[in-house]
Image (tube, helix red, strand yellow):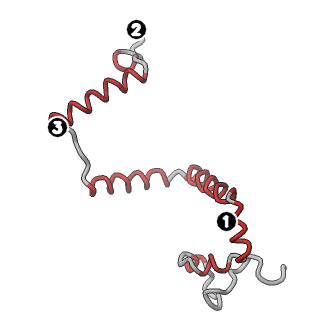
């Protein structure tokens, strides 16, 4: 049986494919038949894409790690955080309310297990 995996458009090199596709896109816009996303359609598509990619836990861990590494490379920023002892940064962010234990005394109180007090 003949190999039909690379025929026609698929057999062209990627640069040639892009050139042809680009011409088709321009022609559709000139003709007025190209689909243009409304802001609502774009929002919905972005939301669906975000849901899809966030299901991949290893991918999310990988990009989170890369973000943390990038921030950590900024020595001035890390020194500033160190001088503050984390307190100002933590108090300034409402998301810490979500991770603070219910029995914390007040918003500025150290969170359990984060180096507050003597070790067990």
Where residue 61 sits in the image (x, y, percent)?
60, 54
Image point (69%, 71%), residue name: 81
Image quadrant assignment for residue 105: bottom right
Decide which of 8, 58 is in the foreground and name it. Answer: 8
Query: Dot 3, crowdedness within 10 Å: few (<14), some or many (≥20)?
Result: few
Name above or below for residue 51 compared with residue 104: above
Mark 2 highlights which residue?
A: 2
Q: Give me the C-alpha separation between circle 3 and circle 1.
A: 50 Å
Q: Nearer the viewer, mark 3 or mark 2?
A: 3
Q: CA distance from mark 1 to mark 2?
A: 61 Å
Q: Residue furthest top?
A: 1
Q: Nearer the viewer, mark 3 or mark 1?
A: 1
Q: Are marks 3 and 1 in contact (CB under 8 Å)?
A: no
Secondary structure state at the residue bearing disc 2: loop
| Nearer the observer, 58 or 71 | 71
- Quadrant in which the C terminus is drawn: bottom right
Is 86 situated above or below 105? above
Judging by the rendered image, the residue that carries numbered circle 3 is 33
Labelled disc at residue 77: 1
| Disc 3 from disc 2: Cα separation | 37 Å
Mark 1 or mark 2: name the one nearer the start of the chain: 2
């Amino acid at each position: 049986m003949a190999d039909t995996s690379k025929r026609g458009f698929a057999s062209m090199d990627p640069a040639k494919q892009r050139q042809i596709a680009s011409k088709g896109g321009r022609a559709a816009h000139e003709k007025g038949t190209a689909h243009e996303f409304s802001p609502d359609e774009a929002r919905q598509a972005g939301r669906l894409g975000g849901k899809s990619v966030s299901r991949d836990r290893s991918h999310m861990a990988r990009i989170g790690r890369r973000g943390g590494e990038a921030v950590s490379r900024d020595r001035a920023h890390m020194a500033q955080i160190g001088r503050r002892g984390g307190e100002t940064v933590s108090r300034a962010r409402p998301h810490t309310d979500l991770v603070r234990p219910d029995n914390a005394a007040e918003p500025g109180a150290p969170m359990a297990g984060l180096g507050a007090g003597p070790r067990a």
